[in-house]
């Protein structure tokens, strides 16, 4: 397994939406990062439809997929990627996942053949593993979730899924504690270190399965850690988690997300991985992102900025239901598709860097997370990761320190406004991270002793110790 120790882009200015150093093709004519952006529609079935295989298949295939594809055709969108984030029952009820995967494959092939529209379906399987039960096969005698996790990947690949992804949960037991206590060391240990170790195990398995079936491997994201931190930090009215803490945890999470491409994932990575600009800077692989067109799912402070270097643009997730303009998936696809059309028009007219910079500048100073994810700053965080690329702990630590110092410099240059509390937290983070040992074994021993009573669900065997 080769780790990234060099940058894909020599400068931040090389990066722009719709272009990746390593484009990828899959599905029915889908090409990502090949000179244009494609929309990715995410959705959720109505409650109750999961009660039988027949109902859930009909919901995903005959209603959601058909509605979305026909609206894309109606509006003249040439490309569409669907994302099915599996509900839990698809990973536990025998035959349910397979039925949905096969059904969506059939309907995309049908419309591609009849109308020429390029289509693909990303299947994001559920990671239901629980720290208290154990994360590795043979540990969870109660639910068998580690085995079901791998089985879900087999089901996707065996039944025609175009793109395999997951939002894995390694390190979540520490992330939960870290976010609620504002403890950056716990986050570094859980997400940056243990999470990366779990990713290596999980994604080595996923890569093996995908290669066997010829399925494209998308990517992962630290949704259970950095996204929780971001959502709890919230907006201007929220103060439960400081936004400077959230921004630093995002940088740390990027070092974890990087493990998927190191194991063979070719992208596009997961849309809810806001660390995507950092990861793309290193790998050159296509990035899926979300922002202002995902208001049906959540709000954030960098809704425009996140479009700056995307190759796939997503709405996050919307429940299937009727709206005035059609079904919810049709309405949100319209919003999504027209934004992508604007990006592609900018590319066609040579104005892509102008639009990129407008996206970025509109949110650059709105908050510390947007500031550190602005493509020029994201590139700097990425560079710090590659300098320690061979070591999970040191590269995550470097990402956190670099991100924190970038935010501090932004404040000092009066580019970024921070409250006194946010600034105090930021300075404490820098001091705390810089004081940690450079030796990985010493760091492990320090954290296992420090959090022995605070995180009782931690089991070293879950991470191969």
Image (cartoon, helix red, strand yellow):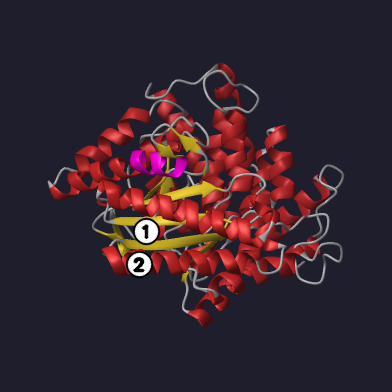
Closer-to-camera residue (218/29): 29
Residue 27 in view, yes or no: no
Is disc 1 surrounded by few (<14), some (14 to 19) or many (20+) residues within 10 Å?
many
* SS at circle 1: loop
Secondary element type, mark 2 = strand
Of residues 191 and 125, the one drawn nearer to the viewer in this rendering: 125
Spot occupied by residue 263 in the image (x, y as percentages of width and height): 52, 70
| Residue shown at the point (61%, 56%) measured from the top left | 56
Q: Quadrant of residue 319?
A: top right
- Are the two marked residues, 1 and 2, in contact with CB atoms closer than 8 angstroms? yes
**Residue 196: % across, % down:** 61, 59
- What secondary structure predominates along the stretch shown in magenta? helix
Q: Which residues are magenta?
A: 328-335
Residue found farthest to the left = 349
What x and y, as percent, mark residue 47?
65, 44
**For this view, does 43 lie left or right of residue 147?**
left
Q: Residue at x 75, y 67 (%)?
A: 136
| Residue hosting label 2 | 24
Q: Is residue 110 magenta?
A: no
Residue at 52% across, 75% down: 210
Judging by the rendered image, the residue that carries numbered circle 1 is: 286
Task: Report the side of 230 relative to 51 (left or right).
Answer: left
Residue under the image location 65 percent in, 39 percent down: 184
* Residue 95 shows in this picture: yes
Rendered location of residue 282, percent (x, y): 40, 58
Work out whether mark 1 precedes mark 2 in sequence or the reverse, and give the earlier one: 2
């Amino acid at each position: 397994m080769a780790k990234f120790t060099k940058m894909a882009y020599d400068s931040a200015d090389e990066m722009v939406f719709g272009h990746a150093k390593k484009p990828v093709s899959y599905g029915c004519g889908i090409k990502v990062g090949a000179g244009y952006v494609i929309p990715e529609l995410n959705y959720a079935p109505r409650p109750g439809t999961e009660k039988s295989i027949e109902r859930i298949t009909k919901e995903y295939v005959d209603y959601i997929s058909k509605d979305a594809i026909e609206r894309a055709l109606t509006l003249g969108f040439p490309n569409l990627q669907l994302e099915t984030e599996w509900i839990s029952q698809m990973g536990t009820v025998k035959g349910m996942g397979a039925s949905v995967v096969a059904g969506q494959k059939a309907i995309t092939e049908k419309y591609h053949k009849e109308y020429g529209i390029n289509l693909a379906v990303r299947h994001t399987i559920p990671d239901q593993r629980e720290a208290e039960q154990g994360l590795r096969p043979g540990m969870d005698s109660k639910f068998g979730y580690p085995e079901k996790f791998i089985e879900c990947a087999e089901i996707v690949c065996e039944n025609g899924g175009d793109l395999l992804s997951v939002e894995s949960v390694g390190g979540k037991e520490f992330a939960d504690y870290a976010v609620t206590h504002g403890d950056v060391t716990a986050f570094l240990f859980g997400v940056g270190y243990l999470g990366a170790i779990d990713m290596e195990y999980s994604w080595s398995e996923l890569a093996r399965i995908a290669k066997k079936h010829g399925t494209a491997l998308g990517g992962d994201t630290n949704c259970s850690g950095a996204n929780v931190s971001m959502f709890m930090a919230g907006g201007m009215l929220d103060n439960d988690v400081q936004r400077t803490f959230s921004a630093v945890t995002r940088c740390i999470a990027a070092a974890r997300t990087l493990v998927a491409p190191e194991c063979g994932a070719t992208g596009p990575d997961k849309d809810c991985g806001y660390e995507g600009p950092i990861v793309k800077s290193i790998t050159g692989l296509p990035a899926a992102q979300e922002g202002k067109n995902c208001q049906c799912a959540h709000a954030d402070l960098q809704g425009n900025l996140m479009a700056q270097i995307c190759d796939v643009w997503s709405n996050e997730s919307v429940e299937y239901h009727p709206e005035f303009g059609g079904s919810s998936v049709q309405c949100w696809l319209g919003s999504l598709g027209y934004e992508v059309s604007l990006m592609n028009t900018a590319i066609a007219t040579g104005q892509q860097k102008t639009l990129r910079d407008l996206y970025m500048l509109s949110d650059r100073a709105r908050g510390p997370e947007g500031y550190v994810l602005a493509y020029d700053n994201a590139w700097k965080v990425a560079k710090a990761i590659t300098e320690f690329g061979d070591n999970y702990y040191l590269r995550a630590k470097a990402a956190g320190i670099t991100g924190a110092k970038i935010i501090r410099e932004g404040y000092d240059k009066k580019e970024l406004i921070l409250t006194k509390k946010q600034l105090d937290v930021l300075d404490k983070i820098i001091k705390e991270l810089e004081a940690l040992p450079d030796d990985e074994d010493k760091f492990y021993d320090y954290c296992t002793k420090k959090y022995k009573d605070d995180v009782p669900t931690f089991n070293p065997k879950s991470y191969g110790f």
